[in-house]
Amino acid sequence: MSILHRHEHKDENYRDVVLIGAGIMSATLGMFIKQLQPDWKIDIFETLDAVALESSDAWNNAGTGHSALCELNYTPQKPDGSVDISKALHITESFEMSRQFWAWLVQQGIIPDPSDFINSIPHMSFVWGDINTDYLRTRYEAMKQHHFYSAMQFSESFDQLQAWMPLVMEGRDKEQKVAANYIDIGTDVNFGALTRIYFNYLKHQEHTHLYLHHDVHDLHREKDGHWRVSVTNSVTGGKKELHAGFVFIGAGGGSLPLLEKSHIPEGKGFGGFPVSGQWLRCTNEEVIARHHAKVYGKAAVGSPPMSVPHLDTRVINGVTELLFGPFAGFSTKFLKEGSLLDLPMSLRLSNVVPMVSAGLHNIPLTKYLIDQVRLSQEDRINELREYFPEAKDDDWELKVAGQRVQVIKKDEKEGGVLEFGTEVVSSADGSIAALLGASPGASTAVSIMLGLLQKCFKEKMATTEWQNKLKEMIPSYGHDLSKDPALTAQVRAHTAEVLGIK
């Protein structure tokens, strides 16, 4: 059945769209579909008792404003010494699209108060030592030339750095070689709050239902191309089956097992490597009040990109917080509320070779995780003191963050490779898609979901109605902001005003 005609189906158990998992990805896709095709029937199923409790929750989400302004892992140094900013450009453009969509939702009254989820926070990169200082200067010179980053500043002056980030410089040896980038257009985003705003809107819309305590335990493709979705109510034990024209698996760490149950050929060979996160959270309000920035450092040699340390001002449910981390942990769970059997149960004949190969090629990661698990509180505080020399033990507590499942995929040369980004896996007919992976997912959710719509709803995306609506919601849609300084300035000024940020 053509996607164009799915909504004409008469079966009372038929849904045009089933969204699995009530996190930022399902929420963003649901918002798009509701605006583009209000008459489609959408059911959303969430295993837990509320939305946004896993990776989208503010305490579980490390990024909170990934716009590639300060994250050094997005600007790697090449063998010739130059710095590649192409990944940063892609992420910044994606974040600008998110800002436009959010601003449109504010103007429609769908988001009542943008300060509930987004706030201005300067973004900084901070390094020490001759080699790292040279790298940061080279990075600055490469980025400063691009209009995305024209507001960026660079300094090696101790006094200037002290003005930008007093906590980081207090008690530091003035002879130490230090450098920093500073840009004041950065933001802090609470994706848990944003997800709750989205679902609060969606559940009140016609033809849309949100079901909590509902576990999707099987997916089966039927002869007519539709999907039979088997669901269990975990409170009552009641079971039901739906028929769906399109299924999105946006269940974070729970996506891989459901993708495997779909048996689509495109999903074969994927594996997952779970990594948990931990933070040091400041409990001293005087210290919290003296830092107003996201200060990102450089990951230690041999450690994975997700380990980039940062001293991070966050606004969570209206309260300013200060976090340092992340520290990694290891668990075989795919979700914070998952099962210790998640990893072994995900093994299939099709993914054993990629997973073993990825493991053999990532022995430094395994060593890093073992070292991280063995850290004591004193060890963590000592790492913090590299960014905040006068940190006191009693001012910090350990807080467990969410589970991330890094993607392992087949690779002809290596057998299997470990990916640190996000990956949309969809069937050839566009009837099902799953989102795997982690950072910088939430910040680029709008861009990722637009790509998914293009893959899975090609006919609809070609219609004038959908194209016009998308341009209304995202003024830069169809344009390349990275090549258009005037349009970038225009949309940034507009979204900053509407969202109440710099």
Image: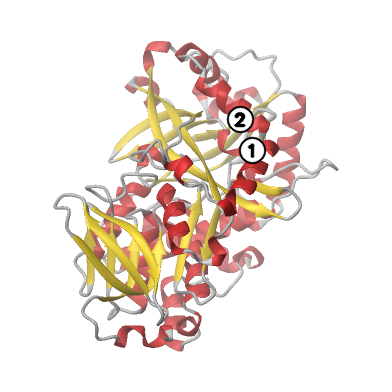
Q: Say the numbered circle drawn on residue 43.
A: none
Vertical relation: 454 (above or below) 284: below
- Given the image, on which type of amino acid does mark 2 rest? Thr
Residue 18: x and y in percent read: 33, 68
Asked if residue 418 lies left or right of residue 184, the reply is right
Q: Nearer the viewer, residue 419 or 478?
A: 419
Would you name the residue on which mark 1 appears? 359
Vertical relation: 145 (above or below) 136: below
Secondary structure, mark 1, is helix
Asked if residue 455 lies left or right of residue 89, the reply is left
Q: Residue at x 56, y 53 (%)?
A: 270
Total marks in image: 2
Q: Residue at x 48, y 81 (%)?
A: 461
Q: Residue at x 50, y 63 (%)?
A: 447
Q: Quadrant of residue 308?
A: top right
Vertical relation: 398 (above or below) 347: above
Asked if residue 159 lies left or right of residue 462, the reply is right
Please say if the residues under marks 1 and 2 sit with CB atoms less than 8 Å apart: yes
Asked if residue 220 lies left or right of residue 379, the reply is left
Residue 105: x and y in percent read: 33, 65
Residue 98 appears in the picture as rendered: yes
Would you name the residue on which mark 2 appears? 366
Q: Alpha-carbon neighbours of circle 2 within 10 Å: few (<14), some, or many (≥20)?
A: some
